[in-house]
Image (spheres, rainbow, N blue to C red):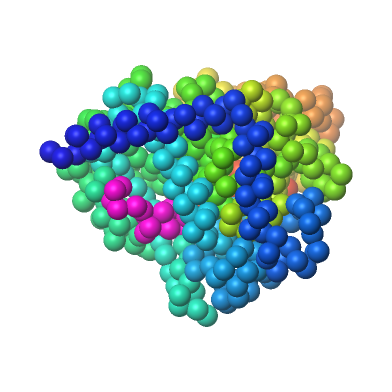
Amino acid sequence: MIYKPLNSAIKLYLNHRFKRIEAMRTDGVNMQAGVINDLWAQLKSTKYVSSYGAIRLNDLPVTNYEELKPFIDQMLDGDTNVLWPGRIDWFSKSSGTTSDRSKYIPVPDELFYQNMISSSWDTTAIIYNRWPDANLFSAKSLIMGGSLSKYSKRKEVTIGDVSAIMIKRIPAIGKPFYAPDPAIALIKNWDEKIDKILKTTLTENIVMFGGVPTWNIVLFDKILDFTGKSNMLEVWPNLNVYVHGGVSFEPYKNKFREYLPKDDFNYFEVYNASEGYFGMQDTQDDGMLLMLDNAIYYEFIPFDKVDDPYGHIIPLKDVEVDKVYALVITTSGGLIRYMPGDTVRFSSVNPYRFQVAGRTSQYINTFGEEVIVSNTDAALSKTCKLFSVKINEYTVAPRYFDNNNKAGHQWLVEFESQSPNLDGFMAELDKNLRDVNSDYDAKRYKDLALKQLEVIAVPKGTFHKWLRSKGKMGGQNKVPRLSNSRKYVDDLISIMNKG
């Protein structure tokens, strides 16, 4: 019974902490000035900064993972003061969506506590502010983490999904309020993990869950099949919060309404990447509040200048509403003017609220159409609503000119149940994509440059099989939505043809 008084005490603390969120809404630019001053005091003594003879951040180049990889390799091997002061023994692993190669992101204590843990408390403060009757500290929240391993060259180093690092290092005050046991949550084999989560959590009082929608769908389908229940509220009656991120939630909305048939169910979007915790949804409106006092400094490059960033990088105070920017971050993990590969669009600059627009490497511009993920998400969501269908996953690639045939886009869509009339669905989807992207519309004019898009309905489970074949099982691994090549689409078609 101690948990109810504890929940009340933590609620008082979170009410006080919410003042941080209010300050981020009103004083973000000044907060960012303080963040970069604090970061620079640490960064200026590193070998990386010294190698450039830099005396301020602007003296350093914009970088990506491949350019920082030699320095990160040194850190993995135990070298000190490379990108961040001291020796780093924790690294988050991200396999990304555009490469089979893993990325290892340094996680020193400063990043873990000042960003990851701090942002988790901020998220909880927002939840209690928006849902005053929340009882997260008198019940349980469901966690589906990744896994951890030791670095082969230096056993002191622990590597894993950022979710797994959070579970392993969760503060003691939070441990009693999560299910399943961390030993289960960190199991490497996802089939075994999901099976044990199913068997150990059915009798728990689960009030909140989180994670990438894909893996929750897999778990929920197995739970409903095992229990014979019609929705998740019959399994966990007090379930009332879903914290989601990693991919746009738009294509999954109808599916989750089926799992959670409750009009006032609380959905919270967060932007929690391997490099750090960037944003969270602080109101019921679309868009996330940029976390401006959590040990990360932000800069931006207009999307059309990504290939030539110098002279075009801008600070937070100069961003404009409705423009797409590539994100550039400097962090307490030692990533300096680093492009994580994400693009954002600000819906507001007072306060700074944004939406993830896509990836700098996930777009289709093979024929000058400049289609980004937010375009395809919006068009698909509208089309699914009209046809009363739900989808599990999708990906899009170009169809090239062939034997005097016009080029176009090919969509692979995994419908939740029976697929609709595809001819009508394709026509409506094409129309909706033209409505949200004028460049695509221009290329589609009278079929002169591009023909109508094609949709292939793939069998249920195809994307799951593809992720498994790539060794990409886990919450940090996501299906690539768009690509200028046919690599992913051809792989998926091959899996489909093999049955």
Residue 85 in the image, given as x and y percentages of width and height: 60, 65
Q: Residue at x 54, y 25 (%)?
A: 286
Camera-side residue of 366 and 174: 174
Instruction: Locate residue 260 relative to residue 113 in the image: left or right.
Output: left
Q: Residue at x 38, y 63 (%)?
A: 188
Residue 200 in the image, given as x and y percentages of width and height: 21, 51
Residue 269 in the image, given as x and y percentages of width and height: 48, 34
Camera-side residue of 213 and 255: 213
Q: Residue at x 45, y 75 (%)?
A: 156
245 is higher (above) or lower (below) than 467: above
Residue 116 in the image, given as x and y percentages of width and height: 48, 49
Query: What segment carries the magenta color?
Result: 161-175
Residue 44 colored in magenta in the image: no
- As drawn, which residue projects farthest toward the left? 1
Camera-side residue of 36 and 82: 36
Q: Which image quadrant for residue 263?
A: top left
486 is higher (above) or lower (below) than 250: below
Instruction: Locate residue 103 relative to residue 6 in the image: left or right.
Output: right
- As drawn, which residue projects farthest toward the bottom? 153
Q: Which image quadrant for residue 268?
A: top left
Residue 168 colored in magenta in the image: yes
Q: Residue at x 68, y 53 (%)?
A: 40
Q: Does residue 408 show up?
A: no
Give the number of callouts: 0
